[in-house]
Amino acid sequence: MDFNFDPILQSWRFLLDGLRVTLLLALGVAVCSFVLGTIVGLARRYGPKWLRVVLVFYIDSMRAIPVLVVLVWIYFALPALTGVNLPPFWSAMFALSFHLAAYVAEVVRAGIESVRPGQVRAGLALGMSGPQIVRKIVLPQAIIRMMPSFGSLLSLAIKDTAIAAVIAVPELMRRADAVAGQSYAPVEVFSTVMIIYFLVIFPVTRAVDIVYKRISFLGRS
């Protein structure tokens, strides 16, 4: 089989712009999901009982429904119900963020619960309030312990952007599919895209692991 990479060389600007959209979408999803997930995780752990019930339902629902279904529902069904039409890019960002935030919330909850109860009791004995204990004792340790899981979720946020191609978001996978269809060179195009994703995600995961190894002692108790 002869390989022809000319279509990639001819369309590199087109693909590069798709990569820019992919990175922008991934950044938005990472920020939104981590902020929302942290709020949900804290509210589930420290909020009133009725709120915990609602948040548990949200978390379990998002983990039980495929992200593709959430994406398609927000893009096609939500406008029919509300009359609000979101552009493909924002539909993808909201869908991926809501879905990933459920996993972030579970990581946050598990990280908080990994801190020994004795440290909380010690804070109470020192006269600290509940918020002070969470802010000064629990979270500093829990955040360190959550870093490996956060690294995995960050790579997942980048990979999930490829799903946005189904609603015509002009990200890398969508543009690669267009190039492959026009050039009849799917092996070359999609192999190149696979390498690009690897070159983007692998350094991110390794960087998180390196940082965690250097500061992991701060999360020990």
Image: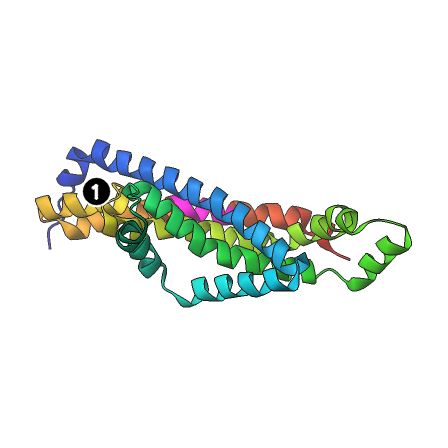
Question: Taking 10 as reference, is 178 above or below it?
Answer: below
Within the magenta stretch, is there residue 169? Answer: no
Q: Nearer the viewer, residue 221 or 121?
A: 121
Residue 60 image position (x, y, % from top left): 48, 66
The residue that disc 1 covers is: 175
Could you tell me which quadrant the N terminus lies in? bottom left
Residue 124, percent across and down? 86, 55
Q: Is residue 91 rendered to the left or right of residue 10?
A: right
For label 1, the SS is helix
Name the residue rendered at 9%, 44% in the picture.
Answer: 182
Q: Which residues are magenta?
A: 200-206
- Give the main secondary structure of the magenta stretch: helix
The type of residue carrying mark 1 is Arg
**Count of numbered tags:** 1
Above/below status of 154 relative to 21: below
Q: Residue 116 placed where, x, y %?
A: 77, 62
Model colouring? rainbow
Q: Residue at x 90, y 51 (%)?
A: 126
Residue 203 as seen in the image, left or right of residue 147? left
Quarter occupied by residue 16: top left
